[in-house]
Image (tube, grey):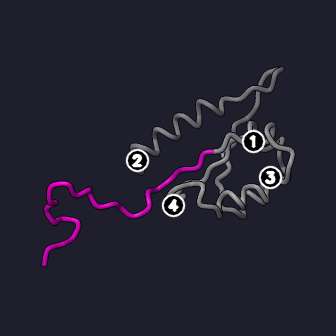
Amino acid sequence: MTNYMNAPLSEGQDLPVAASPSVALLIDFDNVTMATRSDLSKELKLLLESDVVPGKITVKRAYADWRRYPQYVVPLSEACVELIFAPAYGSSKKNATDLRMAIDGLELVFLRP
């Protein structure tokens, strides 16, 4: 018996669709808090339970200076979101979240495709 995934394709046939793709959800939490005034815990739960994100979310990370958002540490941890500490520095309290997220995204693409 021929394995479906290894069976030759007839002309005009599409390639078999793989199971749900793996998805990484990387959240710049500073930007999220500036963009919304609602209950972020409820919003996150709705996002994770919805079908807005295609595929299976295998990596969930939120980047922020968590000293500024202690009220969200427990709800995010309960949602299995890995908290990445990106400390703010300088008088303007900037952090390197964008760069860290870009590096982590590339690392995930190559190490966990």
Q: CA distance from mark 2 to mark 1?
A: 27 Å
Magenta stretch, overall SS? loop
Residue for point 77% across, 60% down: 75
Q: With respect to residue 70, does 34 lie above or below?
A: above
Q: Quadrant of residue 97?
A: top right
The three-letter code of the residue at mark 1 reads Val
Q: Which residues are magenta?
A: 1-26
Of pointers 4 and 3, the one earlier in the residue sequence: 3
Residue beneath disc 3: 40
Instruction: Name the residue that disc number 4 marks.
Output: 56
Whether residue 76 is situated above or below residue 106 in the rendered picture: below
- Give the Cα distance between marks 4 and 3: 21 Å
Q: Position of residue 27 (x, y in %)?
A: 65, 44
Circles 3 and 1: CB distance less than 8 Å? Answer: yes
The quarter of the picture where residue 78 lies is: bottom right
Q: Which residue is mark 2?
A: 111
Mark 4 to mark 2: distance in Å?
Answer: 17 Å
Question: Which residue does the numbered mark 1 point to in the structure image?
Answer: 32
Q: CA distance from mark 3 to mark 1?
A: 8 Å
Q: Nearer the viewer, residue 71 or 17?
A: 17
Q: Secondary structure at mark 1?
A: helix
Magenta stretch: residue 28 in it? Answer: no
From this view, report whether residue 103 is shown above or below residue 79. Answer: above
Say whether disc 2 or disc 3 marks the residue closer to the N-terminus: 3
